[in-house]
Amino acid sequence: MTTTTPPIRVLLVDDQPLVRRGLSLILSPDPSVEVVGEAEDGEQAVALAHRLRPDVVVMDIRMPVLDGVGATEELSRTLPDCKVLALSTFDMDEYVVAALRAGAHGFLPKDVSPEDLGAAIRTVHAGEAVVAPRLLSRLISTYVRAPLDTPPPPAAAVTGELTPREVEVWRLMATGLDNTGIARSMDISHSTVKNHITSIFGKLDVRDRAQAVIAAYESGLITARTGSGDQAGGQV
């Protein structure tokens, strides 16, 4: 007996009709995705999401009435199983970090390729973050205001229950290294890195890599001066 996996139900949200149409056309050939609705602002997106119950909302950041950050926050609170993938015209956009804080599972630029958009939707639907660490570090080092004129607080105050090895994994993650880069830097296996990251998420009470990196900057473990924006990207 063959079991067919149902397509991922997607709601498209953008205040420009041509953008919504373009995204719909990009996704239409992908049998794993079904566009179930479109919204032109965040308020309409929240209402449609409650009615249509999409698996993933592809959310523009800058919109009238209710912007993508506010809509993401509302969906994260009221429909936690609905994943939000934020879009922005600009790579360096303070609203992207705000959307990640609000509960978005990832960020992509609007000029993303059709293949990458489909892959990102599938990854977000699976509960993983879709933000390249290199890009995430650039965004956070620019827009997260960690104190730059004072040294970081003692490790114990920052990390709580994290072990010294987990602290180092967290620090390398925040500088922009992907799992392979962390494994190489620490001379440990890729699976060990993933185990450490899972433990870090639990101890820091963060949902994914994006929130863990934000926490590293906000705690003072790493600052904009020590972060690196030139490392290879990747995903957890």
Image (cartoon, rainbow, N blue to C red):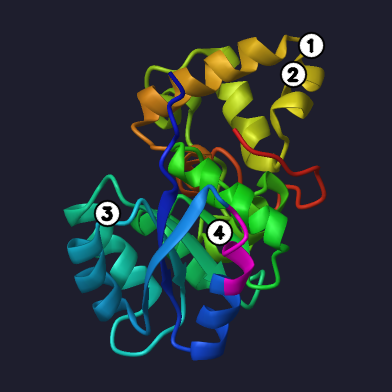
- Mark 1 and mark 2: Cα distance apart in space: 6 Å
Query: Residue at horizontal 31%, vertical 77%?
Result: 42
Callout 2: helix, strand or loop?
helix
Mark 2 vs mark 4, foreground winner is 4
Query: Residue at horizontal 55%, vertical 38%?
Result: 221
- Residue farthest along the front direction in this orientation: 1
**Labels 4 and 1: the sequence-earlier one:** 4
Quarter of the C terminus within the rendering: top right
- The residue under label 3 is which amino acid type? Ser
- The residue under label 2 is which amino acid type? Ala
- The residue under label 4 is which amino acid type? Phe
- Circle 1 sits on which residue? 187
**Labels 3 and 4: the sequence-earlier one:** 3
**Labels 2 and 3: the sequence-earlier one:** 3
Residue 201 within the segment the image draws in magenta: no
Callout 3: helix, strand or loop?
helix
Q: Which residues are magenta?
A: 25-30
- Mark 4 and mark 1: Cα distance apart in space: 30 Å
- Mark 3 and mark 4: Cα distance apart in space: 15 Å
- Circle 4 sits on which residue? 107
